[in-house]
Image: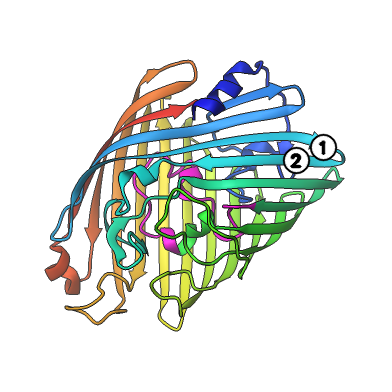
Amino acid sequence: MTSVLIVLLAASAGAQEMNGALGPYPMTRSASGTSWQPDSTPHEGLHIMKDDWMLMAHGWADLTFDQQGGHRGGEKIFSSSMLMGMAQRELGPGTFSARTMFSFDPAMGPNGYPLLLQTGETANGTQPLVDRQHPHDFIMELSISYAYAIDEESSVFGYFGLPGEPALGPPVFMHRWSGEEIPSAPITHHWMDSTHVSEGAATLGYVWKNWKAEASGFRGREPDKFRWDVEKPNLDSPAFRLSWNPTRDWALQASYGHIHSPEQLEPEVDQDRVTASAMWSGRWRDLPWQTTFAWGRNMNIPGNVLDAFLLEAAVEYRKNHSLLARAERVDKDELFQAGEFPPGTAFTVNALSLGYLYDFWKFEHAKLGAGLMGTADLLPASLTSAYGHTPLSLMAWLRVKLI
């Protein structure tokens, strides 16, 4: 973090308008990987011009007290973080861009943090993580891209990341303005945007006006238990995405991917994933607001067909106050490995989270805030003996963020 900030703060101020990294559209449309968000999405962070380069840094760090309720809950104090740096310039007939994204999540330990109903990945390579969120890798993205301008309305582009994000799903939750202030990952993460840290992703795409079509090859296996390293790339899985921003306030996408052997503990299982999402960003009664609705379907081969739905929103009031909400409904078949239910039994579970964040101190390039969020899990009667009646959970956090 320090080295990136030194570079940016030492550069002279005075940013100028530039196209997005992949084509002739506003930079505010760019989200994680090659995904799009609404043009009107608020952008924070540092934006500096240095000679021919546009330099940007965006990031935050949370210190969170986590109390998950019910019979399978837990308690932990942990820190999660994200720091992204980008450098972009015009090069020949097109645009060159390089991007990095780091997280100090591995420092919270291999078991991550308690999060009821969360599933996916492993802490130690032998046991699955259940009712816990795994830490993200230290290096979440190291990528380059080049977009060749065909004319004033269209371009073709190439993107490669190790790690990187293929053309599958909506922007990852930590890059969605509707969800980036919420201190926990969605329990629908592995139905929609979990491929954002793929150990190898290569994408070719075409942009025409407000449309984008793209295809990727990427490594299907989730990152392993060693969170501080970069793994060997293996482009064994394809993905395809069509994106459309009909107005500056809307971003729509539909995507499909065949994920080869995503889980280390079930190497014989492949997965077909289909996603669709709609993001709206604008003002309601003069208040900045963003809402994301997303659907994902995982079709395990062999295995169950599982659906997930997510609705989340963030609204800002007087620049210092933020109201946060997330509602999820998802089919889970990894909650039990053995014992009360046969392994692979699927349950439809629901989670509703409401939160508030207050920014009480602002510096020149950063702000400090404190938040509180409560979650209620609405479960089928068959899970009462394992989880209790409507488990209630609480998170309280301090957050520092670049602005």
Q: At 38% from the left edge and 72% from the top edge, which residue is drawn?
A: 265
**Residue type highlighted by circle 2:** Phe
Question: Would you say the magenta stretch is mainly helix, strand or loop?
Answer: loop
**Mark 2 nearby-residue class (10 Å; few <14, some 14–19, many ≥20):** many
Dot 2: what SS?
Answer: strand
**Residue type highlighted by circle 1:** Leu
The region drawn magenta spans: 161-190
Query: Residue 181 lies in magenta, yes or no?
Result: yes
Q: Report the label total.
A: 2
Query: Residue 29 lies in magenta, yes or no?
Result: no
Relative placement, left or right, of 7 versus 360 is: right
Q: Which mark is residue 355?
A: none
| Residue 180, percent from left and from top | 43, 41
Nearest to the observer: residue 290 or residue 191: 191
Using the image, determine if residue 183 lies above or below residue 362: below
**Mark 1 nearby-residue class (10 Å; few <14, some 14–19, many ≥20):** few
| Residue 368, percent from left and from top | 37, 24
Nearest to the observer: residue 37 or residue 399: 399
Using the image, determine if residue 147 lies above or below residue 275: above
Q: At 76% from the left edge and 49% from the top edge, which residue is drawn?
A: 209
Q: Which residue is mark 2?
A: 96
Sequence-wise, the earlier of marks 2 and 1 is 1
Using the image, determine if residue 38 lies above or below residue 48: below
Q: Which residue is mark 1?
A: 91
Spatial separation of the CA atoms under disc 2 and disc 1: 6 Å
Whether label 2 touches label 1, CB < 8 Å? yes
Nearest to the observer: residue 362 or residue 244: 362
Give the quarter of the image for residue 306: bottom left
